[in-house]
Amino acid sequence: MRLGVFALRDFVLGEVVLEGRLVTVVERRTEHSFQVDWDRHVELDSPARLVNHSCMPNTGIRDNGADGYDFIALHGIRAGTEICWDYASTEWESIAVPACACASADCRGASLGFRHLTHEQVDRLGEFIACYLSCRGGSRTGREVWHRQRER
């Protein structure tokens, strides 16, 4: 049986759907960990750890002050709808979805991580990318590393 998280009420564009808070730091990535920095993976509390992947998600992630991620509505979400996010928005290299089951029109077939995305797929994530992967600071961002790989 596949677990998931479903909206108990309607949400509007930009609203925080749920907050994922740190439970523990893990030594290495797992199928349920979240990457929050280049060498840091954490487990978040439920229901965040149960939110499934979609190549066309209805939420995007934003770093929060609890060493985790907030899930932000990318459009209106009706009560009863499954909440989903794109795992590539936090994972440089992902092991969680070797065969994607999202069935969206833009399904990539797998969620292998940020480093495997095309320019268009990165652009589609917009501002909803983990801070360590974005251009919002630091000397080594995922976008910079990603662009260097694509130029080769």
Image: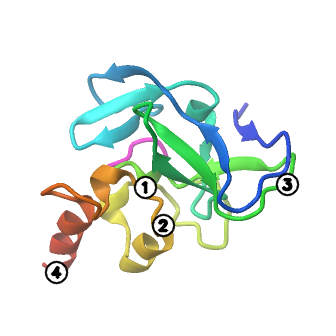
Which of the two labelled residues, at mark 4 and mark 2, occupies the earlier sequence position? Answer: 2
Q: Which residue is mark 3?
A: 78
Is label 2 in contact with label 3 (beta carbons under 8 Å)?
A: no
**What amino acid is found at the position of numbered circle 2 in the picture?**
Leu
x%, y% of residue 18?
A: 64, 39
Is label 3 in contact with label 1 (beta carbons under 8 Å)?
A: no
Q: Which mark is residue 125?
A: 2
User: Where, quadrant-wise, is the C terminus in this rendering?
Assistant: bottom left
Is label 1 in contact with label 2 (beta carbons under 8 Å)?
A: yes
Mark 4 nearby-residue class (10 Å; few <14, some 14–19, many ≥20): few
Separation of residues labelled 4 and 2 (CA atoms): 20 Å
First to last magenta residue range: 93-99
Between disc 1 and disc 2, the foreground one is 2
Q: Which secondary structure, mark 1?
A: helix
Q: Which secondary structure, mark 4?
A: helix
Q: Which residue is mark 4?
A: 151
Separation of residues labelled 3 and 1 (CA atoms): 24 Å
Which of the two labelled residues, at mark 3 and mark 1, occupies the earlier sequence position? Answer: 3
- At a point 56% along the width and 31% down the height, the residue shown is 49
**What amino acid is found at the position of numbered circle 4 in the picture?**
Glu
x%, y% of residue 46?
A: 61, 25
Q: Which residue is mark 1?
A: 88
Residue 56 is left or right of residue 23, and the answer is right
Separation of residues labelled 4 and 3 (CA atoms): 41 Å
Residue 105 is left or right of residue 151, and the answer is right
- Residue farthest to the top? 24
**What amino acid is found at the position of numbered circle 3 in the picture?**
Arg
Q: Which secondary structure, mark 3?
A: loop
Which of the two labelled residues, at mark 4 and mark 3, occupies the earlier sequence position? Answer: 3
Which of the two labelled residues, at mark 1 and mark 2, occupies the earlier sequence position? Answer: 1
**What amino acid is found at the position of numbered circle 1 in the picture?**
Ala
